[in-house]
Amino acid sequence: MRTTNGAARHRSKKRYFKRAKGYRGGRKNLLRTVKETLLRSGAFAYRDRRKRKRDFRRLWIIRINAAARERGLRYSELINGLNKAGITLNRKTLSEMAIHDPTSFDAVVEQAKSALAQAV
């Protein structure tokens, strides 16, 4: 009597098709196309998990720059002043402060300005 790998093959295919749920056309129901699509989607997911971190940092810097310019400093000057003042706030926190707590952001900017003035 010959043996087949029917059950294992079926289980393997089911796993692929389950991951491809919601895709259009053959990308959801043709095994070769599903495998190719999942390989590409995995590569994109891996790349974009790293890209998301860059994108958020860019967004925070844009927000901080806008808020700093309203207070008479450029972004680079603000960061330089913060470093000289010994203030170690990350960009995410600064961005959140600029949006949700402008008074404390004003205080931080003033400290940065005074540190820049002392350095000159």
Image (cartoon, grey):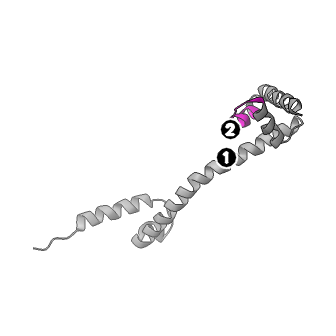
Residue at 90% from the left image edge and 36% from the top image edge: 72
Q: Is residue 116 above or below residue 40?
A: above
Q: Which residue is mark 1?
A: 56
Label 2 near label 1: C-beta < 8 Å? yes
Q: Name the amino acid, label 1.
A: Phe
Q: Is residue 8 above or below residue 33?
A: above
Magenta region, residue range: 85-99
Residue at 34% from the left image edge and 61% from the top image edge: 14
Q: Position of residue 65 (x, y in %)?
A: 81, 42
User: Reading the chain from its start, which is encountered first: label 1 or label 2?
Assistant: 1
Q: Name the amino acid, label 2.
A: Lys
Where, by quadrant of the figure, is residue 115 drawn? top right
Element class at badge 1: helix
Q: Position of residue 90 (x, y in %)?
A: 68, 36
The N terminus: image quadrant = bottom left
Where, by quadrant of the figure, is residue 15 drawn? bottom left
Residue 92 numbered mark, or none:
2
Q: Is residue 94 magenta?
A: yes
Q: Residues within 10 Å of mark 1 (few under 14, many from 20)?
A: few
